[in-house]
Image: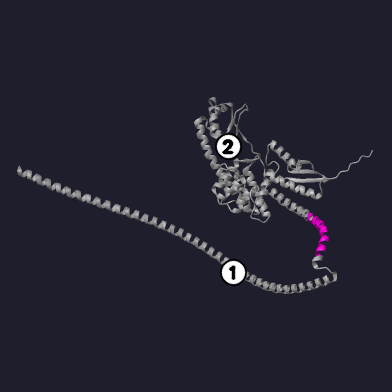
Amino acid sequence: MIGTIIAAVIALLVGFGGGYAIFRYIATGKYKSILETAAKDAEVIKEKKLLEVKEKFINKKSELEKEVQQRNQKIQQSENRLKQREISLNQRQEELSRRRQEADQMQQHIDSEKKLITAKQAELDKMQEQERLKLEELSGLSAEEAKNRLVESMKDQAKLDAASYVNEIIDEAKLNANMQAKKIVIQTIQRVATETAIENSVSVFHIDNDEVKGRIIGREGRNIRALEAATGVEIVVDDTPEAIVISAFDPIRREVCRLALHQLVADGRIHPARIEEVVAKVKKQLENEIIETGRRTAIDLGIHGLHPELIRIIGKMKYRSSYGQNLLQHARETANLCAVMAAELGLNPKKAKRAGLLHDIGKVPDEESELPHALYGAKIAEKYKEKPDIVNAIAAHHDEVEMQTLLAPIVQVCDAISGARPGARREIVEAYIKRLNDLEAIAMSYPGVTKTYAIQAGRELRVIVGADKMSDDDSSKLSNEIATKIQNEMTYPGQVKITVIRETRSVAYAK
């Protein structure tokens, strides 16, 4: 029994050991197989990655070769340009040397001529002295006494001759100057003529029906009061169908209110809190639009290097008007006029265009100033590093300061042309009548004036004087005095022509 058990245990142990050996053999084989498979897969992946790396390397190499080739071409082009410049400089150097030699020869010739002239002049002086002494001996008078007698005898005649000669020269100069100036001005205006639109102080917001009008007004008018408080405008709601009138002298405020109303009506949510939110949003949008308008204007006119703040001020001009004339349109027109006129006169048109565009920046201040807009605009331009001739042109375009360059009168003239064109500006009737009365009153204040007539919308003043009270010369003097007084005491667009009329009438009746 025990032997059987022992034999069974031994057999069991032997079986267990054999099974373990077989299992280990099988497991070892699978492990090796897995390792071989993994090694093969790794090799395949390795080959793929190597191919990818090679492909990328080839692509990078080709790109680098192209870049190097392009750089070599650029270098070659630069070398060619440098060679051409060197040749040109050598030619210029030779030309300068030749001219210097010619100048030296010319100087030597001039020096010799000067010596000859000096010698001849000394000889001439000697001969004149001899002749003077002979004349004094023959006449019995000294040279000084003879000169005094001759001067006294010819003084009155010389005055008359000089006066007539001066008048002829003045008339001829006026004729030629007027013809040439009119030619330049007419050509300039024709080349940059623009349509003119008068700005108003009200805007009309159109609505679909009266229901929307009621929603805009709100309960007991709270919505419209909130909108007026947020925008600073006056909103007029009357019986006009499908329209609301926005009234304000500030175009920016009107535009903010109009855009805010448009968004509120489109959204449908109209209440005080929403109104404040939309108004704040519209103000930011309008500020961005102002900057974009200024930037586009500078690009359109070909003006570069403007300070960002100047660009913003130019954009604000779109929402400003002067005598009903849009300030941005006026500035653009003045800039184009300045460029053309400067080109006609042989000056720098880019500088003229820049000065023309910036000449009225003092009319759109961010802060109130007691200075005239010309001086304030010059101060702003100087602050943002504009050149002195530009600053002077801005400051002097209304004669606030002395003109220092030819650019200043061009800006002044072109500003007057743009503002004085028919239909460009609008004046209040009372101001217009007052200006005409002031013109006539100034002329009537002079003695000898019998009648005055302001015609051509105040651009010409006819002055009639008594023929027995004033001579022709006095008439010319009177016209200049009246013109000077009008310039010093009045403000007006463009220029005023003063015509003094002196005549004698004799009337008889045949019975």
Quadrant location of the C terminus?
A: top right
What amino acid type should be assigned to the residue bearing mark 1? Asn
Extent of the magenta region: 146-167
The colour scheme used here is: one colour
The residue lying at 30 percent from left, 54 percent from top is 39
In the image, which is nearer the foreground, mark 2 or mark 1? 2
Look at the numbered discs 2 and 1 and tell me whether their residues touch, using CB distance below 8 Å: no
Camera-side residue: 105 or 319?
105
- Magenta residue check for 372: no
Main SS type for the magenta part? helix
The residue lying at 37 percent from left, 56 percent from top is 50
- Magenta residue check for 165: yes
How packed mark 1 is, by other alpha carbons closer than 10 Å (few <14, some 14-19, many 20 or more), is few
- 369 displayed left or right of 64: right
Among the 4 quarters of the image, the one containing residue 162: bottom right
The image shows residue 305 at horizontal and vertical percentages of: 56, 52
Chain-order first, disc 2 or disc 1 = 1
How packed mark 2 is, by other alpha carbons closer than 10 Å (few <14, some 14-19, many 20 or more), is many
Mark 1 lies on a secondary structure that is helix
Return the mark for residue 90: 1
Residue that badge 2 annotates: 255
